[in-house]
Image (cartoon, rainbow, N blue to C red):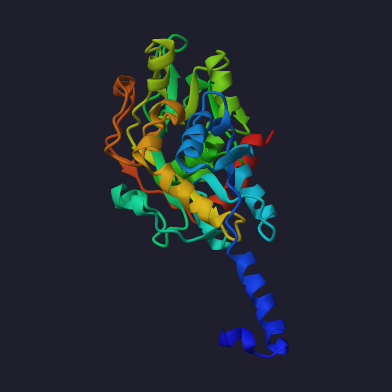
Amino acid sequence: MRRFARRFAHTLIIVPFIVATLACSKPEEPELVVYTYDSFVSEWGAAPKIAPLFEKATGIKVHFVQKGDGGQLLAAALLEKDKPQADVILGLDNHLAPKALGVNLFEAYAAKALADIPVDLQIDPEHRLVPYDYGHFAIIWDSEKLAQPPLSLEDLTKPEFAKKLILMDPRTSTPGLGFLAWTKAVYGQAWKDYWARLKPNVLAMTPGWDTGYGLFTAGEAPLVLSYATSPAYHKEYDKTERYRALPFAEGHVRQIECAGIVKGAKHRKNAERFIEFLLSPECQAELPLTQWMLPANPRTELPASFSLALKPEKTLSSAENSLTDDAVTAAAILAAQ
């Protein structure tokens, strides 16, 4: 009772403080905004599967917003850096990470579930980007359209493969940027010469993976850049082994896909719960048949169709820091008349 006996002048100071404190402790709205790439939110993608699971587990409604492919996703996040509309960015990879982390886009969050994730997949020691799946890039071959496939990156430049390859734009697409990383890992400083020699064999350079792979399955070309796990999709749904991932003599580059909590996110606590969910056994189990990638948690059981996925004998290390700058040069080489 002593505190209510103080002078009224003191209460004028105390009451606003109490009101402000109560306002600050107000629970977050039960919602979350996640920016991601197009295929993640497609009808066959992971979003339609995991959104209801997350809402059922937490009561939080998640809004997935598609932003093109990985490069476009990063560009959208950069545009909103000072006034972020997303809480989580999902779909940046190890090749885009240096640029994203260099501009301070994300808040650190050491998820408890990271204890189950191999250390070599955890590309950021500060846990601003958290891995949820991974896979190796590969050239996919339509064995009914082409009798003899290439067996190396160098083979891809041979005249017999003129206009037979579909690539993705390295400025906008993470597979496109991954292919650039692949060629730099193999050819070093001579990568530009390689791209110039490859140019006659490229039928199309599409903005994203969806469009490029769609052209491939429509029969426009017998070779396409994709993932070592892509044949598992065709085995699972098309019941065919027609499409095969080619083991290249030089080895293959790995992509690690990540999610991060946006700096200044409006729903920070909800975002943390989403990151934990993304790495949970329940969510990881949904990724193989929607993402067609390998889940980050190695204890996740894989479908039988994944027996058709290529298991590269050699994983190449890629120089990632200069990739986004070199992507402009690479695209210009292919676009040159």
Query: Does residue 163 appear in this view?
Result: no
Residue 29 spot, x, y in % from top left: 61, 50
Left or right: 137 as drawn, with respect to 8: left
Left or right: 213 as drawn, with respect to 186: right
Residue under the image location 39 percent in, 44 percent down: 279
Q: Quadrant of the C terminus?
A: top right
Residue under the image location 47 percent in, 10 percent down: 145
Q: Quadrant of the N terminus?
A: bottom right
The residue nearer to you, when weighing 60 against 222, is 60
The residue nearer to you, when weighing 267 against 4, is 4
Position of residue 272 relative to residue 8, above or below, is above
Residue under the image location 61 percent in, 71 percent down: 21
The residue nearer to you, when weighing 222 against 305, is 305
Residue 234 spot, x, y in % from top left: 42, 16
Query: Quadrant location of residue 331?
Result: top right
Q: Name the residue furthest bottom.
A: 7
Position of residue 309 relative to residue 103, above or below, is above
Position of residue 64 relative to residue 267, above or below, is above
